Image: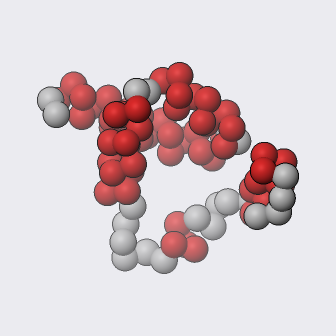
Amino acid sequence: MDADELARLEWLAQEMACRVRDYDPIANGRWLQATTTPDERWQLLFVMAAAIPTDVPWKHLTRWVDLPAVDALVAERFGRAA
């Protein structure tokens, strides 16, 4: 991977970190499909996972999530409760 590819993955990871807080999962999925290649999506999983601190509890990292809103989106999308 060259410096340009790495810079693009960094940009994608930062953009996704912002988008996940502002847009619903469906919109983010459409954005990812339109903006990235399948290889970039695969690589992005590892780049973003590497950015997660492993010494902080998961509930602390995700406490900003509005769980009732997430449950409603899951129910709407899949026709069932989360």
Q: Is residue 12 above or below residue 74?
A: above
- Is 19 on the left or on the right of 82, as rendered? left
Q: Determine the image quadrant of residue 26.
A: top right
In the rendered image of this protein, does residue 46 appear above or below residue 13?
A: below
Regarding residue 7, the answer to whether it shows in the image is yes
Q: Can residue 73 be seen in this view?
A: no
Q: Residue at x 21, y 25 (%)?
A: 4
Spot occupied by residue 52 in the image (x, y as percentages of width and height): 39, 61
Q: Percent x, y for residue 7? A: 27, 31
Quadrant where the N terminus is found in the figure: top left
Coloration mode: secondary structure
In the rendered view, does 20 fall on the left or right side of 2?
right
Please tell me which residue is depicted at 53% across the width and 28% down the height of the picture: 33
Front residue of 79/27: it is 79
Residue 68 in the image, given as x and y percentages of width and height: 81, 62
Outermost front residue: 79
Residue drawn at 83 percent across, 58 percent down: 80
Q: Nearer the viewer, residue 23 or 39?
A: 39
- Is 14 displayed left or right of 20 in the figure? left
